[in-house]
Amino acid sequence: MVDEIVHTLSCQHYEEPECFIGADMTLWPCCFLYGDSLHMYEQITQTTDRDFNDLTKHSISDILQTDFYQSLKSRWYASHPAHLRKCIRACGLKGVYKNKKVHDTD
Ligand code: SF4
């Protein structure tokens, strides 16, 4: 069921393309995953390395080559052992959640 929604994802990281830089100078695909990482870091990043995306230590191109970024799309599928629920919930169905927020401010 969830996997049927994957093709409807409107991912701003890939589509804009866009990244998010945390106040601690870490580089994220978007603010959604940065926010979740604050309270479930290892679940989101699949690593205990707190520096893998630190822009003061690594270049953007090196960070984008890490397993976290390289596995991002495959983790959209519920069958993936490290499935990213936030991607489905925030950006599934063409980002209806984000669209709703836009309409709410109209
Ligand atoms: S939550 Fe996932 S699908 Fe949505 S923008 Fe971020 S990485 Fe892309």
Image (spheres, grey):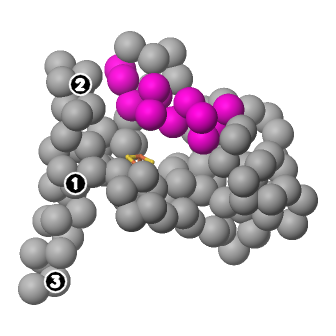
Q: Are marks 1 and 2 in contact (CB under 8 Å)?
A: no
Name the N-terminal-most of marks 1 and 2: 2
* The label number, if any, that marks residue 105 in the structure image: 3
Q: Of helix, strand and loop, which one carries label 3? A: helix
Sequence-wise, which precedes: disc 3 or disc 1?
A: 1
Left or right placement of residue 100 versus residue 43 in this view = left
State which region is magenta: 67-78
The x, y position of residue 4, in whole percent, is 18, 24
Q: Which residue is mark 1?
A: 95
Q: Mark 1 falls on what kind of element?
A: helix
Q: Nearer the viewer, mark 3 or mark 1?
A: 1
Distance from label 3 to label 2 (Cα)? 29 Å
The answer, for residue 32, to whether it is visible in the render is no
Q: Which residue is mark 2?
A: 2
Q: Is mark 2 within 8 Å of ligand 1?
A: no
**Picture quadrant of residue 96:** bottom left
In the image: residue 38, left or right of residue 36: right
Please report contact status of discs 3 and 1: CB closer than 8 Å, yes or no.
no
Q: Amino acid at mark 1?
A: Gly
Residue 45: quadrant of the picture: top right
Q: Seen in the image, is 40 located left or right of residue 94?
A: right
The earlier-in-sequence mark between 3 and 2 is 2
Can residue 71 be seen in this snapshot? yes
The picture quadrant where one finds residue 69 is top right
Label 3, label 1: how far apart the Cα atoms are: 16 Å
Label 1 residue near ligand 1, CB within 8 Å: yes
Residue lying at the far front of the rendered structure = 61
Disc 3, disc 2: CB below 8 Å?
A: no
Residue type at mark 2?
A: Val
Question: Is 83 placed above or below 45 here?
Answer: above
Q: Amino acid at mark 3?
A: Thr
